[in-house]
Image: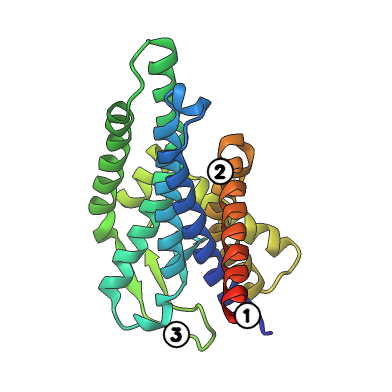
Amino acid sequence: MSFYTFADVSQILGFAFGVLLNCILIVLVLKSGNVLSDQGYRPIILQVCVTDLLCVIVTFFYMPLYLPAGEYHFCYTTGFFNDAFKDAPLFTKIMFKAWFFSVYITLYTPGVQFLYRYLVLCREREPSYRLYATLFSFAVVFQLAFCIVSFGTTDYVPRTHNEPYREYILADNPSNVDLLVSKATLPIVGILIPVCIDSFGGSFNAHAKDIIFIVQTVPIWMPVFNPLLTIFLIESYRTAIFRCCKSEMSSTKVSNVTAMNLNAL
């Protein structure tokens, strides 16, 4: 199996498991009672599931590898739509902003959760979906405004290489509002992760395709492990999964026995 084939298979599997596990966890949160719901933490788990779904879906279709290069910032694209829409610069810019939106909304989550816990536990506010949605909506509106304002500061650069993953868009000089706002007010973890991977790989003379492979495969599996750990660390969710599997196996066994009896008759 070639490098690119393995990367594509990993991306497809990460997308499938990410969507499946987050949907299962959403159903468990809505239908199962546990100590977290008594403390008003169900909105937090649901919001994490939704942002994980958003992140894994956008990452599957389009994910830029964000790299600084002198006074510019290159974004090499990977993902399902990389070749399908190589001649659609407007769509490329939209997906570029959609990816940043999903990443930063995910990074806003801890701050929103902290404020929600503070209001509930320290200010005796009644825990509710409305309270959490109100707090989270501020993060959504701010990030949407940032994406709209910064849309015009990103230029599309057509493909100039024969290697895969060479189509990219190029952000303007860092003095523009896009990078100024991001450096001044937004979390930079989503940018630092690929930059650190690139620096680490460069210190060991790693090939560019190896760096792209790491950045392409790691982020899409993060929304897979989040719901997986939540399901197996919370006893009521874990019990519900095991009970469902046991019930399914029992019903399958009964169906097989019934079919055998009918065949005997």
Q: Name the mark nearer the viewer: 2 or 3.
A: 2
Say which quadrant the N terminus sits in. Answer: bottom right
Q: Is residue 175 visible?
A: no
- Residue wearing tag 1: 264
Measured Cα–Cα span from mark 2 to mark 3: 53 Å
Q: Residues within 10 Å of mark 3 (few under 14, many from 20)?
A: few
Q: Position of residue 251 (x, y in %)?
A: 56, 60
Q: Position of residue 137 (x, y in %)?
A: 28, 37
Which disc, if any, is residue 188?
Answer: none
Along the polypeptide, which appears first: circle 3 or circle 1? 3
Which disc, if any, is residue 240?
Answer: 2
Q: Residues within 10 Å of mark 1 (few under 14, many from 20)?
A: few
- Residue wearing tag 3: 160
Q: Residue at x 41, y 69 (%)?
A: 61
The answer to whether 218 is drawn above or below residue 133 in the figure is below
Q: Position of residue 10 (x, y in %)?
A: 59, 70
Along the polypeptide, which appears first: circle 1 or circle 2? 2
Q: Residue at x 56, y 55 (%)?
A: 224
Q: Amino acid at mark 1?
A: Ala
